[in-house]
Image: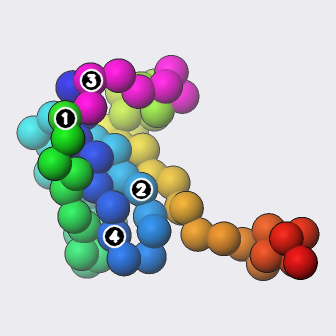
Amino acid sequence: MFDVYRNDKRDFLVLSTGSAVPVLYSAHKWRKSRKKVLKVSDEIKSAVQAQGYYLRSLRATREQMIEVE
C-alpha cells in the first residue's frame, strides 16, 4: 500500500505506507490523501522501491500555457 500526499503548489508525493516524508521535502506543507491507495503504476512503484518516494509536479508549465492559447 502507498500513502499519497499533495501540497499547495500542486506537487504529488507517493511513499510506501508508514514512511516519513523525505528531509529534502519536509519543509513543504503536505496533505495526506484520506483514501488508501492499493495500486500504482509500474513507474511509481519502481521509483518508490529505488528511492523510497516518487515526486511529480502537477503545475502547468509555461509551454503548456502557451499551447492552450
Q: Which residue is mark 4?
A: 7
On the picture, is 35 further left or further right than 24? left
Q: How many other residues sit within 10 Å of disc 1, few (<14), some (14-19) or many (≥20)?
A: few
Residue at x-position 24% and y-position 67%: 30
Q: Which mark is residue 38?
A: 3
Q: Which residue is mark 2?
A: 12
Q: Earlier in the sequence, mark 4 or mark 3?
A: 4
| Residue range highlighted in magenta | 37-43
Quarter that holds the C terminus: bottom right
Q: Is residue 18 magenta?
A: no
Rendered location of residue 41, percent (x, y):
49, 25
Q: Earlier in the sequence, mark 1 or mark 4?
A: 4
Q: Earlier in the sequence, mark 4 or mark 2?
A: 4
Rendered location of residue 13, percent (x, y):
36, 52
- Give the quarter of the image for residue 12: bottom left
Q: Which circle, 1 or 4, is nearer the viewer?
A: 1
Marks 4 and 2 in Cβ contact (< 8 Å): no
- The amino acid beneath tag 1 is Lys
Marks 2 and 1 in Cβ contact (< 8 Å): no
Distance CA(mark 4)–CA(mark 3): 21 Å
SS state under label 4: strand
- Give the quarter of the image for residue 22: bottom left
SS state under label 1: loop
Q: How many other residues sit within 10 Å of disc 2, few (<14), some (14-19) or many (≥20)?
A: some
Marks 3 and 2 in Cβ contact (< 8 Å): no
- The amino acid beneath tag 2 is Phe
Distance CA(mark 3)–CA(mark 2): 16 Å
- The amino acid beneath tag 3 is Leu
